[in-house]
Image (tube, rainbow, N blue to C red):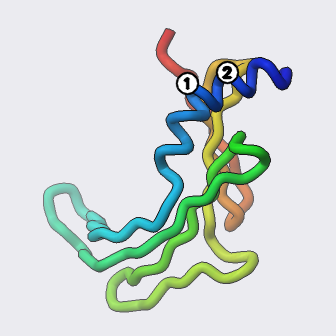
């Protein structure tokens, strides 16, 4: 991605959309283990920050699942999201386990 393309995307393209996610977040997390039957509900807090010059955002969070506290620590679960203009698709990666996926944007 050239500097000019990134600058345009940061101003009004997909990377500008990512920037709207940056900040502190709080809410409820609901988990279903069986369709139609709520298995767990808990409060969750998180922080989203921009990295690599706004190319990606990193989401770190804490909450609980079935009464067990979950907290992000170094080398624990966090996710990053970004937009790859070369393939016109969103990417998502997690640090635990190390994995990435890509979803193409609608034409």
| Residue shown at the point (24%, 62%) measured from the top left | 34
Q: Residue furthest left?
A: 36
The quadrant of the picture occupied by the N terminus is top right
Rendering coords of residue 68 (x, y %): 41, 90
Rendering coords of residue 31 (x, y %): 30, 67
Q: For the residue carrying disc 2, how many other residues have a C-alpha within 10 Å: few (<14), some (14-19), or many (20+)?
A: few
Q: Residue furthest top?
A: 107
Relative horizontal placement of residue 92, taking residue 51 as reference (left or right): left
CB under 8 Å between callouts 1 and 2? yes
Q: Which residue is mark 1?
A: 12
* Numbered label attached to residue 28: none
Relative horizontal placement of residue 12, taking residue 83 as reference (left or right): left
Q: Classify residue 77 by image quadrant.
A: bottom right
Relative horizontal placement of residue 80, taking residue 7 as reference (left or right): left
Q: Classify residue 8 by image quadrant.
A: top right
Q: For numbered disc 2, what is the local secondary structure?
A: helix
Rendering coords of residue 78 (x, y %): 62, 66
| Residue shown at the point (61%, 46%) measured from the top left | 81
Q: CA distance from mark 1 to mark 2?
A: 6 Å
| Residue shown at the point (15%, 65%) measured from the top left | 37
Q: Which residue is mark 2?
A: 8
Rendering coords of residue 95 (x, y %): 71, 63
Is 6 located above or below residue 33 in the figure?
above
């Amino acid at each position: 991605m050239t500097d000019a393309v990134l600058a345009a995307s940061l101003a009004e393209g997909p990377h500008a959309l990512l920037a709207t996610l940056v900040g502190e977040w709080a809410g409820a997390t609901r988990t279903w283990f069986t369709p139609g039957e709520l298995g767990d509900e808990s409060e969750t807090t998180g922080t989203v920050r921009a990295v690599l010059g706004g190319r990606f955002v990193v989401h770190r969070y804490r909450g609980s699942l079935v009464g067990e506290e979950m907290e992000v620590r170094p080398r624990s679960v966090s996710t990053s999201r970004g937009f790859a203009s070369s393939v016109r698709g969103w990417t998502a990666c997690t640090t635990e386990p190390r994995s990435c996926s890509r979803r193409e944007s609608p034409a």
